[in-house]
Every structure is written in C-alpha cells, then in structure tokens.
Amino acid sequence: MIEVVTFGCRLNAYESEAVKARAGEAGLENAVVFNTCAVTAEAVRQSRQAIRKVRREKPDAKIIVTGCAAQTEPETYSGMAEVDAVLGNDEKLDARSYFDLGERVRVNDIMSVKETAPQFVDSFDGRARAFLQVQNGCDHRCTFCIIPYGRGNSRSVPMGAVVEEARRLTDNGLAEIVLTGVDLTAYGADLPGKPRLGQLVRKILKLVPDVKRLRISSIDSIEADPDFMRAIAEEERLMPHFHLSAQSGDDMILKRMKRRHARRDTIEFCETVRGLRPDVSFGADLIAGFPTETEAMFENSLNLVDDAGLTFLHVFPYSTRKGTPAARMPQLNGPIIKERAARLRTKGDAALAARHETLVGTAQILLMEKQGLGRTACFMPVQVTGNAEPGSFRDVLVAGTNGKQLIAA
C-alpha cells in the first residue's frame, strides 16, 4: 500500500495523485510519501512533525519525502533518522525514482527543468472534483517567495495534452475540473504560438463538452488576457469564483514585495468581473505583517476586503524564508504579525457571513462533495439533508446560514 500525505496547494494535491500512480507503477509497497510545502516555516515544521508521528506508528514503512520543501532544503529531511529517501520535485513524478531507493537523496537543479509533461491522472479518490495541472514554476521573483526555487521557471503543458487529460477525467465520472499551476496567468508563454490562459479555457470547454464545471485555482488579475475575460462573460461552465494572488492592499508594500499590480488593479478587476458575472465571488491571498508594514499600511489590506468585495481570504502571517530579499528587510515582531493575521481572518469571516446572507432565499445548483455537503457555482458550501451521491448535482433552495455554511431547505 502507498499512502501520500499532502501539504500545501492544489498543485501539490494534483501531483500527489501522480506520485501515487508513478510509485504504484514502480511496484513500491508499504510506503508513506510526504509531499511537502515550503511556503512558510510553519508548513515545514508541520511536515517534520507528521513524519515523526508516522514513523512511530509505522516503524516498518518506507518514508519518502518530496515536494517543495524537500527541493529547497533537502538537508532538513535527510538529517532526519525517520526518513528513508528524499526526492526533488522533478524526481517525484518519474516512476524510475521509486524502483531503487538506495540513493537516499535525489534532488536535481530545478532551474534546469524546461518542460512540464502531462501526468495523466485518471481519477481523484473520494473527490467530486479533479485538479488538472496546466503550468508549473514561476519566472517572477517576489521578494517574500521561495517557491520559484522549489518549482523552477515557468513552463506549460501543451494544450492538446491538457484537453486529453480533461477528457480522461470526465470519462471517469468527474464533473468538475480545477485548472492548477504556480502562475496560471503565465500559461503558454513558452509554447509555440504563445497561447494564453483564456484560449486554453475556451478550448477545453469546446472540445470536452462533458466538463460540467471548470474552475481556475488562482490568478494574477493584472495578467488576465482578453480571451479569459470573454470566457468569464460568455462561458456559463466557467465557474464564477476567482482566487486572486493579491498579497497586500497597500501600494508601498506591494512595491516592496515586487508585485506587478497596484491596489487599484485588484479593485478594478473585481468590479469588471462583477459587471460580467454578477453572481461571482472572489477569494484572495493576503500576507499580514510583511517587513516594514505599518498599521496604516495594514489597514489598507483590511479595507481591501470591502473595497474589492472579497469573500474568501487565505491569510498568511509573514514567514521569513532564508535566501529571499524580504528576509533582509526590517522585520516586525512576531506578536504584531500574529495579531494582524487574526484581524484579517476576523474580517474575512465577517465578509463570508455577509455574502451568505445575500444568498438566503435563492435557488442554487450544488455539486455534492460528500454526504450532507455541496458547493454552489460561486463555491459557497451548503449543508443539505438526505442522500446524495458525491459528484452528483442537486437543486436546492437556500433557507438560511449558520455563518460558516449555507443551509438548504
């Protein structure tokens, strides 16, 4: 048996399915693979804690560590007695890596990887939706981010392969597909003809009619191309929920982060999309306590939630990552970072509750995720009664909310 423990993003979740398939092809048995995340020091700490716990519970299992943290700091894991092998982000997707685990550390130079091959994952165990990797890596160098050193430079999966995998997934009964990548709006720049994300979206929806719902995992709004905006307006199967890599609501902090957008860009994108799809909901990544952030700068991030109409917040307390430019900037005290992150989360909870209230009394079509829980097109969770097969659709009337979820009649 092969167990894969996933930390971090949706791209990791997709790759974990590929890891399970590739390790299975190699005949690996009695193994636990940890697919790690390097975004924060806390993510690394949690992975080390989980490794130790599994070793105590499964003393005879092979423990393999891979993912972004294994790529950026392999010595952290090779120094753990509990770990049998460390594989880089490129090696983890090659079945040959699992045939012979005699070489304890195999982590190549990720910047040397120039292509991203399709993994052809057939299904996602226990999930109503599937993630589909279309891009990997990032050419940008935001001052806080370690991920390019874990993922390499931007590279795209050819459109034909994406369409083929979308068809395989829908043929296996998955009604919803989520396109994933590290920098999705960079899609296609390295491919012949330089197609953009919008062209890919329209191609999938045209050539794979059995895709009932198509979602986008996370985007840089400043890089949204005209075809993508037209798809938002015209393609009903493109779900009206967009998660933005905003990071801050203050222009000076955005410059110090070396982001490519200003505060106003986020607000204008949300206003434009809301005009095209009034039922849309927006999420955003926001970092609290970035170096040099004053209270007034932080207030701009708080106010962005209302000014842009954000609903789902992913709040990250700033975490120093060794080797990044931000690590050399004047740092805030830990208690200040923690307090600001808590305030942002409270603001996000209030925004979500307010959006729930606007949906009470409306008719919704849910994709059922599991017994008793489904999602609207705009990704709102809804509690339901009665039996419903995961992956099926159900028409409901929203009768109320408990502040965290909607409740169907």
Image (cartoon, grey):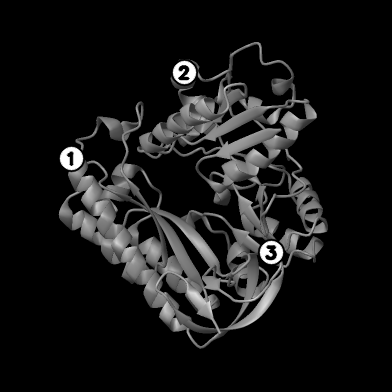
- Residue 80 numbered tag: 2
Give the alpha-carbon distance from disc 2 to disc 1, as whole Å: 30 Å
Q: Could you tell me which quadrant the C terminus lies in?
A: bottom right
Q: Nearer the viewer, residue 36 or 206?
A: 36
Describe the element under mark 2 as helix, strand or loop: loop
> Which amino acid lies under the numbered mark 1 shown in the image of this protein?
Asn
**Residue that carries the numbered disc 1 in the rendered image:** 333
- Few, some or many residues within 10 Å of mark 1 (<14, 14–19, 20+): few
232 to 286, vertically: above or below: below
Residue 375 location in percent, x, y?
A: 58, 69
Residue 133 location in percent, x, y?
A: 65, 46
> Which amino acid lies under the numbered mark 2 shown in the image of this protein?
Met
Residue at the spot x=80%, y=61% of the render? Answer: 208
- Few, some or many residues within 10 Å of mark 3 (<14, 14–19, 20+): some
Give the alpha-carbon distance from disc 1 to disc 3, as whole Å: 45 Å
Describe the element under mark 1 as helix, strand or loop: loop
> Which amino acid lies under the numbered mark 3 shown in the image of this protein?
Pro
Describe the element under mark 3 as helix, strand or loop: loop
- Residue 390 numbered tag: 3
Which numbered disc, 3 or 2, marks the residue that appears first in the sequence?
2
86 to 179, vertically: above or below: above
> Closer to us: mark 1 or mark 3?
3
